[in-house]
Amino acid sequence: MKKITVLLAEDHTIVREGFRKMLELEDDLEVAGEAQDGRQAVALARKLRPAVVLMDIAMPLLNGLEATRQVLKAVPATKVLILSAHSDDAYLKSATESGAVGFLLKQTSAHDVCRAIREVQKGNTFFTPSISRRLDHLHPLGPGGAGHVNQNGVQLTSREMEVLQLIAEGKANKETASELGISIKTVEKHRENLMAKLSIHDTAGLTRYAIGAGIIESSVQLTIV
């Protein structure tokens, strides 16, 4: 029997280990790899080409929603299941717009997590039962939608989303440039574009926007640069 390969993308080691041990008990499921941030998740998805990615939203360097877009662009056959501790409409809408085919709350039972993996691998969708009925009024843009669109219709590119997250995490332009493999001037240009698009005039404002949009968690200790 061919096993369903799963990539675990979760920045908390103890949570990731729990999921791995849970999946190892299933005869038809196999953990192909583990990622502790969104950027690593994208790289491993390209390398391992798993059937399913179990993707946390709030991860450092690259959040799970943007990582989902990049994974689906690189490996279209892979299915992504979003994991989150939050279930408000903004998170659900962002998840479906990113191309995810399922959304699981972190308190979901082991049985439902395994069932969700099997369902999405077959081409179906799967949402935690308590939130599935709320999806009718949400309008996904389709798999791998490019970038992030806010409530005012402003669209950010994938690269702008990456830069925004690193700015919000307190990274200086030099650190951001190094992380993304681009020049400092390019980072500065992306920062200018972000401020212009969002009508925000300082780094603190960009950070508040990133928190409000769910790009980073408000519990993250930030250094405003």
Image: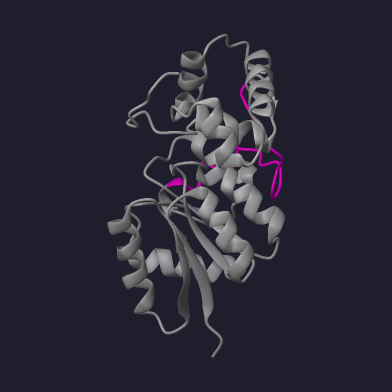
- Residue at the spot 45% in from the left edge and 46% down from the top edge: 131
Residue at 32%, 31% in the rendered image: 219
Q: Look at the image and tell me in which quarter the C terminus lies.
A: top left
Give percent across and percent down for residue 154: 69, 22
**Residue 118 visible, this orientation:** yes
Q: Position of residue 11 (x, y in %)?
A: 38, 51
**Residue at image coords 40%, 64%:** 112
How many marks do you count on the picture? 0
| Rendered residue at 55%/30% (across/down) | 174
Which sits in the foreground, 162 or 115?
A: 162
State left or right for residue 108 relative to residue 199. Answer: left
Which coloring applies here? Answer: one colour
Q: Is residue 7 above or below residue 90?
A: below
Q: Eyeballing the image, is 114 above or below 187?
A: below
Q: Residue 22 vs residue 113: left or right? A: left
Residue 77 spot, x, y in % from top left: 69, 65
Task: Please indicate, yes or no, whether residue 153 appears anywhere in the rendered image.
Answer: no
Q: Residue furthest bottom?
A: 1
Residue most extreme to the left: 14
User: Is residue 193 one of those drawn in magenta?
Assistant: no
Which sits in the foreground, 4 or 198?
A: 198
**Predominant SS along the magenta part:** loop
Q: Nearer the viewer, residue 163 or 24?
A: 163
Q: Which residues are magenta?
A: 131-151
Give how far across and how far down residue 58 sits, in percent.
43, 42
Quarter of the image with the N terminus in it: bottom right
